[in-house]
Amino acid sequence: MSQQNMSTGNHFPDSKGFSPELFVGRAAELDNLMNWVAAPDVPKRLQTITAPPGYGKSWLLRQLKHRLSNRPDILLIDVPLDDLKTETHIRDWLVSVINDARGLYPTVRDSSNNDSLGAITFRLLEDLCQRCNPTILPILIVDDFDELPLNERTFLEKQLLEQFWRHPCSRILISFRNEASLSSHILRRGEAPRVPLTVFTPNVGEEQLQKRATKEESTTLSIADLSPLVPLYKWTHPGINTCLYETAKDRKANNQLPLITADDLKDCWLSPLKQRVQGPSDLDKVETDLKAIINQEETWTLETFAQTLSYSRSLAYSRIQILLALSLVLNDRHRYKVVDGIREIIQAETELRKQAASQNQSANKPAS
């Protein structure tokens, strides 16, 4: 029997466009995770993947699942975050997980209406880990955990994740942004060193585009076509790479030139933030802050930020906290930096606008 994925509440929608054929890079991170899965006993049974938005946390989880697809001794259980708002929701979901598991492993026992969430979870894990032959390693997968409000994350940690963690045979795999963390001291105690994702190297970014171009033969685009259109950008941010490629592909199909504009660059880095800020004015403030500070040194202090934007120290601190919460800025011992990839794409946007302004000025200059 091959490794099974519990289809109930699958939190990896097809809309994210994952394909094993398009996956690139992350060899060291995959090996790290595969070794953690393969080890018969690990000191820390909770593993977290951290990175800013667009760095490929969800794709890494999908690729891990693909790599584990032939393992008969593993059961991956995807947590449907949007569907587990109350204890009743969790109970109903656990019952559905048990029903699906019983279809795969007949020795899994049914639940009772009088059982607590802890009892239901423990019995399921006990059956998988001790009563099945061969025994099964259950891995709970929680993708994009930081997308939930803090109170909902705290609730799920207490009512679901802690219950899984308490059984010594279970493992938990969670992805969230750099600044996110677990509230539960029980879970933090069991957390292994994080698996952080960085931007791609330029070579891997080029490979990412080449794989997409190869798969879509009718609208082939190469790095040679795109690089001159985006000065200063090295194609290192996985999510922005995809956005720019899809934009250029659509423009090419519609015979539109240029294939990439400054507005396209802005849309690729700024639009994903719209759901995380309160309104257009707040989005404008984020844009203003970042475009001002990227002209300074790569790392900077609170004082530099305040001086550059003409903010008071308290307002500068408040603005930086917003940028940190949006994973646009990282904090390293009281020095800050705009995250890799975002900094370069904003610099590229600024350069394209300067070029356009210069061209317009030349075109409007009267002939002598």
Image (tube, helix red, strand yellow):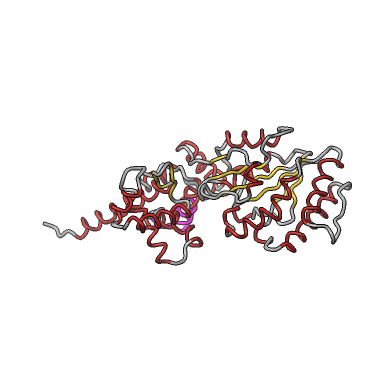
**Coordinates of residue 314 in the picture (x, y in percent):** 36, 57
Residue at 55% x, 48% y: name it: 216
Figure label count: 0
Residue 349 lies in the magenta stretch: no
**Predominant secondary structure, magenta span:** helix
**Coordinates of residue 292 in the picture (x, y in percent):** 32, 53
Residue 248 lies in the magenta stretch: yes
Residue at 37% x, 53% y: name it: 290
Say which quadrant the C terminus sits in.
bottom left
State the extent of the magenta-drawn residues as a range.
245-257
Q: Is residue 341 left or right of residue 312?
A: right
Say which quadrant the N terminus sits in.
top right
**Coordinates of residue 133 in the picture (x, y in percent):** 86, 38
Quarter of image, res 257: bottom left
Instruction: Identify which residue, 17 or 368, lies in the foreground.
Output: 17
Q: In this view, does 51 lie above or below 43?
A: below
Residue at 48% x, 56% y: name it: 250
Instruction: Identify which residue, 60 or 93, lies in the foreground.
Output: 93
Q: In this view, does 169 lie to the left or right of 341?
A: right
Residue at 60% x, 47% y: name it: 175
Residue at far front of view: 185
Residue at far left of view: 368
Q: Is residue 279 left or right of residue 158?
A: left
